[in-house]
Image (cartoon, rainbow, N blue to C red):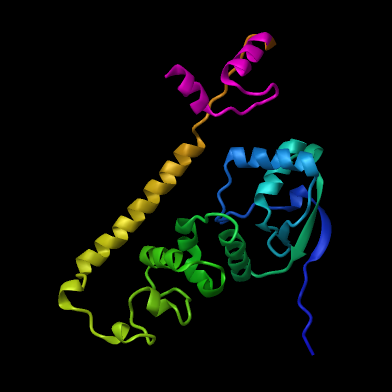
Amino acid sequence: MTTRLKQSETRNIKRSEINLNPVNPKRHTEDAVKLQKKNLQKVGFLGGIVWNERTGNLIDGHRRVKAMDLYYKYDGTPETDYTLKVEAVNLDEKQEKEQLTYMAVGNTKADIDLIARYAPDIDLSDVGLGADDLAAIGSLVGTADLDIPDIGTELFGMGGEDTEAETEPKPKHEEKTEAEKIQHVKDMKRQTEEKAEQQAMDEAAYCTLSFSNYDNYLDFIELVGATEGDRYIKGERVLEMIE
């Protein structure tokens, strides 16, 4: 007899009962949230938000909640509080982080550096991370404390059982010194920091134009070939005209 799968419970709760998860690996830009708001206004809220009643933290649906915050102008006060439908689960902190990671990895580019910070606390073997992501995490935090059954040693060059090449001793000239290993970890951390810094800069790469009257706004819209009502126009279109 097949065991029935555990299911979440659909509930209507107040926004004030929800915490945005502090270790959510998904990165949502302001533009992405505004696009989500536009989609909500077009088709409505389709559900799918996963909320852990034990901690009050979101597990999935951060962008949708942020978009609804914009729509309802939620600022944390009772006057702007609103009700939304969630899928309620009851998970401990380890399970919450594992499911948070599982749902992040399959849908968007996850913040590997952030996952690396709590990687020793969870089982990495079943959250959807690819070999490259696992290797990057291993380089950042080391492998001794990571819970990666069966595949951990193979990924991080600690031996394996599948091929003869893996069981043969590594030629002397290919072995890395301890100093080289340390430098490799430092390089990986530096590259991750640079990538995060560049991403933060890209997310901040916008400005607001204002016009003294609506006619001037319409002239600008016509000039750049946009549509009346547009509030977001790629700056590159203006740069091309200047060039």
Residue farthest bottom in this picture: 1
Residue that appears at 20% across and 65% down: 179
Quarter of the figure that contains the C terminus: top left
Magenta: main secondary structure equals helix
Residue that appears at 82% across and 62% down: 10
Residue farthest left in this picture: 173
The reply to whether residue 81 is in sight is no
The location of residue 167, given as percent across then percent down, is: 30, 86
Magenta residue check for 230: yes
Instruction: Identify the image quadrant of residue 30.
Output: top right
In this rendering, the answer to whether 219 lies above or below 30 is above
The location of residue 154, given as percent across then percent down, is: 38, 78
Relative to 97, is 190 on the left or the right?
A: left
Quarter of the figure that contains the N terminus: bottom right
Magenta residue check for 186: no
Residue that appears at 47% across and 70% down: 120
The location of residue 73, given as percent across then percent down, is: 74, 35
The location of residue 197, given as percent across then percent down, is: 42, 43
In this rendering, the answer to whether 176 lies above or below 184 is below
The reply to whether residue 42 is in sight is yes
Relative to 81, is 177 on the left or the right?
A: left
**In front: 85, or 168?**
168
* Magenta-highlighted residues: 215-243
**In front: 202, or 92?**
202
Relative to 167, is 109 on the left or the right?
A: right
Relative to 230, is 85 on the left or the right?
A: right
Instruction: Identify the image quadrant of residue 172.
Output: bottom left
Residue that appears at 78% across and 54% down: 47
